[in-house]
Amino acid sequence: MALSLLLVLIALFFHDTAAASGGAMGGSFSSKASSSSRSRRVYSTSYTTYAYRDSCFGSRRIYTVHQIRMGSRGDIHSFFIAVFALGAMVVIAYTLYDRYRPKPSVIKLQVMTFALDGKACSLQQDLNHVALKADTSTQDGYKYILEESAKALLRHSEYWLSSHLLERTSHDGKEAETLFYDISFEERSKFDEETLVNIDNHQEQKNTREAVSTSANPFIVVNVIVATDGPLKLSPVNSATDLKDILKKLGGLAKSEILAAHVFWTPQDENDHLSAERVFQDYPLLTGFKDKLD
């Protein structure tokens, strides 16, 4: 309620109509991450070899014959019992493996900053710099984007106003990949225009538009979307301290743990302005920090 009231009051001071420019950077699932491992099946067959002397030519011929033996009824019963026991062991082993094996997860972290003095726009400039410099075709680049974006957000912690965290564990890599792309598409579709893009080494930057607002950017919303090779089990964000811990974990991920990473922010264009009404519309799940609203 306190956050909603604050946004409504702020909205009274900003009536500019502006498009939501967006910045996007990151890398998607690599071939190593998205391809499923293939196991080779090895079949073995037992053969019995017989040798005898040919009476016509006195030569020695060797024949290899596939041998199938039918045992007694007791042997057959024992055979089926052994097969059943082996099958049960395989099922139990697979169930335990499926339950306890590391499963890929997808994390979405939204952070909104606010500063009437315009100082929060330096966060915008930091993210622009990372996007222009990053190599988004390698896992090293994924780590660089996450690490630098997390550090940029931590440097502007005094301007944090609200956040939202989502973490979902997938059954396998294919499911995680689908979820990752769905979330990324949903967030990117909120932009009216992408003015700076560096995704999978596809780079595009549009010319800065004319100023649409005479006031400084009060709001900047950052989306960090990460797919990891195992669940991070992040705690809910109830305070600025919780958010700091999460950003440190995301920024400190090893490159081998990162399957894909995207970072989106709006506004990207320094002449653009994100209104309170647009924040309400596009980011309804943002929640204020208790330690800042109390």
Image: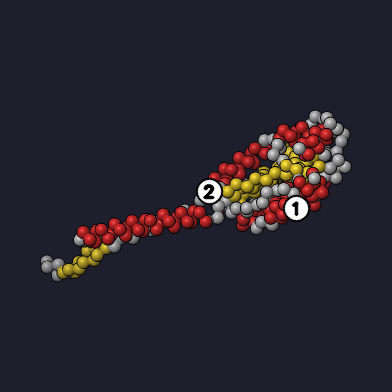
Residue 121 at x, y = what percent? 82, 43
C-alpha span from label 2 to label 1: 31 Å
- Give above or below for 143 relative to 63: above
Name the colour scheme. secondary structure
User: Is there a contact, CB below 8 Å, between mark 2 and mark 1?
Assistant: no
Q: Residue at coordinates 76% horizontally, 37% vertically from top-left? A: 1
Q: Residue at coordinates 53% horizontally, 48% vertically from top-left? A: 171
Residue 190 seen from this side: yes
Of 290 and 258, the residue lying toward us: 290
The answer to whether residue 9 is left or right of residue 287 is: right
Residue 262 seen from this side: no
- Tag 1: residue type? Thr
Res. 39 image quadrant? bottom left
Res. 18 image quadrant? top right
Residue 241 at x, y = what percent? 75, 52
Dot 1 alpha-carbon crowd within 10 angstroms: few under 14, some 14 to 19, many 20 or more = few
What residue would you read off at disc 1? 241
Q: Single out the residue that lies furthest toward the left.
A: 56
Residue 111 at x, y = what percent? 74, 44
Mark 1: which secondary structure? helix
> Disc 2 or 1, which lies upstream in sequence?
2
- Tag 2: residue type? His
Mark 2: which secondary structure? loop
Q: Single out the residue that lies furthest toward the front.
A: 294
Q: Residue at coordinates 72% horizontally, 48% vertically from top-left? A: 238
Mark number, residue 223:
none
What residue would you read off at disc 2? 171
Res. 65 image quadrant? bottom left
Position of the C terminus, as image quadrant, is top right
